Amino acid sequence: MGDRPVTCCFTGHRPEKLPWGDDEADPRCRALKRKLADAVEAAYEEGMRHFICGMARGCDLFFAEAVLDLRERRGDVTLEAAVPHCAQAASWPPEDRLRRQRILAVCDLETLIQERYSPGCMLRRNRYMVDHSALVIAVYDGAGGGTRQTLEYAMRQKVPFLDISPL
């Protein structure tokens, strides 16, 4: 695990930045999940075997679930959770905390970036993921924020990315 040439990470929006919010039954959300699963499959076909997820609400968890689905079909896939700080999910809705916990329980590796929250911990998590990856998959709508910062960092580091529109 952790071999950069075969590692792919993910960055993407939280539910509040998606047009459908938390409604995963929305056809646009189902379509996005299909595009994300296709992107994970394509990354696998290009040689990616280790996938890193930042474990945020929304698209991060969709990505992790797509990787876990791929792992069920392909035994040589690993999933790493890059957790920014111990209390990441403390203020989340209970169903999202449970979903995250279910994913964490089956990850092959969990990397804790730092114990306690600080203003820069999400940025450090995102840089860790890019610095350990040969490819970034992103769900990005062009807006400012952490996803944009992560993609700008990936460009500076010359790490290629695949941009998936949420619509």
Image (cartoon, grey):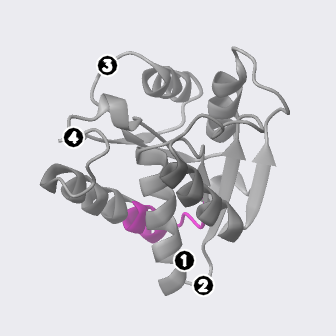
Crowding at dot 2, Cα within 10 Å, few <14 / some 14-19 / many 20+, comes out as: few
Residue 106's spot in the image, x, y percent?
A: 67, 70
Instruction: Residue type at mark 2: give it.
Output: Gly
Q: CA distance from mark 1 to mark 3?
A: 32 Å
Q: CA distance from mark 4 to mark 2?
A: 34 Å
Q: Name, please, the residue furthest toward the left.
A: 27
Residue 48's spot in the image, x, y percent?
A: 55, 63
The segment highlighted magenta reads 40-50
Q: Quadrant of residue 25?
A: bottom left
Residue 75 tag number:
2
Please name the residue that numbered disc 3 is placed on: 143
Residue at the image point whose x is 54% and y is 49% from the top: 94
Please name the residue that numbered disc 1 is placed on: 71
- Labels 1, 4: front one: 4
Q: Is residue 41 magenta?
A: yes
Pick whichever of labels 1 and 3 is earlier in the sequence: 1
Q: Quadrant of residue 141?
A: top left
Please name the residue that numbered disc 4 is placed on: 20
The reply to whether discs 1 and 2 touch (Cβ–Cβ < 8 Å) is yes
Residue at the image point whose x is 27% and y is 57% from the top: 35
Which residue occupies the foreground of this view, 23 or 67?
23
Q: Is residue 128 magenta?
A: no
Residue 52's spot in the image, x, y percent?
A: 62, 52
